[in-house]
Amino acid sequence: MVMRAAAWHADRVQAGKGQAQPWWPEPPAVDAVEVRLRHEDNRRAWNEAAQRYRAGLDDAVEYLRAGGVHLHPLELEHLGDLGDWCELAVHLQCASGKDTLSLLNAGAGRVVGVDIAEGHIANARQASERLGAAASWYRCDLLDTPHELDGTADLVYTGRGALGWVHDLQGWAAVVGRLLRPGGLFHVLDDHAGAYLFDPAASELRPSGADYFANVTGSRGWTEQYVGDLGREKAEHAVKHERLWPPSAVFSALVGVGLVVEQFGEHPDEYWPAFPHLDPQLRRRLPMTYTITARKP
């Protein structure tokens, strides 16, 4: 099974090298080995992205030093004043830590960030050292989040483009469940899979052909509005793998590890310009994001 999965993965990556299109369809991961291989590809890709984050590190530090809180209005609404209840927040898939450190400015006593990409963790450590922040950082696949953190988190926070890079949703939910202390809260705001039933490059609502229930894509390179080409041809970028998870799948995974969902919402609110050419009035008709708040009994 290991050899079959590894060989299949290598074939897909090799096929990706010759792809003229920016992305290609893939089947869901076949087993735990393929999950890990895809996560490892994503680690390499997110190390590329960390270069762009590093270029903005000085601005991020100054923003945070001035008390900036880089959280979405929906997140602020649902979480309230963290100073009232959150001693420790754990941020899964924390990237370079701007949002993690924002949780401190929002009132959390301490924060922990977990990310698979060493470039992102290096950025986060540098930022927190410059700020003198009460923050700790772990470089690992989120499925390997250290057990020393089990039962310690008042808040487990994630989202805004995070879950699409996870290829084992049940494994992810198990980590969330073990990190939370009894009474602890989980919160996610992320992309709604329904929006991706439409072509994000179109100026009208045009079907994309995406599979709402099991859409998986491989790709190389980054959009200009996000990371850009980093001075390299697209074919020289790392292969990465994304999966659209319907909100119902995330909801069920959290309930499956014993969490009690307290809030579930579908929203027209964006956190990035996913449909840059679409009329804003049309965008407001789409479920762009969803939120879930769940508590550990």
Image (spheres, rainbow, N blue to C red):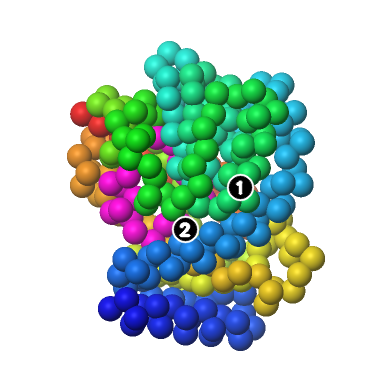
Q: Position of residue 187 (x, y in %)?
A: 40, 36
Q: Nearer the viewer, residue 289 or 187?
A: 187
Image position of 210 (left or right of 283): left
- Describe the element under mark 1 as helix, strand or loop: helix
Is residue 43 something that shows in the picture?
A: yes
Looking at the image, which residue is at 47% across and 15% down? 83
Mark 1 surroundings within 10 Å by alpha-carbon count, few (fewer than 14), some (14 through 19), many (20 or more): many
Furthest residue toward front: 148
Mark 1 to mark 2 CA distance (whole Å) = 15 Å
Query: Where is residue 85, by image quadrant?
Result: top left
Looking at the image, which residue is at 47% across and 58% down? 165
Looking at the image, which residue is at 72% across and 52% down? 52
Which of the labelled discs sits on residue 120, or is there none?
1
Q: Position of residue 81 (x, y in %)?
A: 48, 18
Q: Position of residue 31 (x, y in %)?
A: 30, 70
Q: Nearer the viewer, residue 258 or 125?
A: 125
Looking at the image, which residue is at 31% across and 66% down? 32
The number of discs equals 2
Q: Is residue 63 above or below residue 246?
A: above
Residue contact between numbered discs 1 and 2, judged by CB atoms under 8 Å: no
Which image quarter is the N terminus in?
A: bottom left
Which image quarter is the C terminus in?
A: top left
Mark 2 surroundings within 10 Å by alpha-carbon count, few (fewer than 14), some (14 through 19), many (20 or more): some
Is residue 268 something that shows in the picture?
A: no
User: Sequence-wise, which precedes: disc 1 or disc 2?
Assistant: 1
Single out the mark in the foreground, 1 or 2: 1
Query: Where is residue 279, by image quadrant?
Result: bottom right
> Which region is colored magenta?
156-176
Q: Is residue 278 magenta?
A: no
Residue denoted by label 2: 165
Image position of 57 (left or right of 281): right
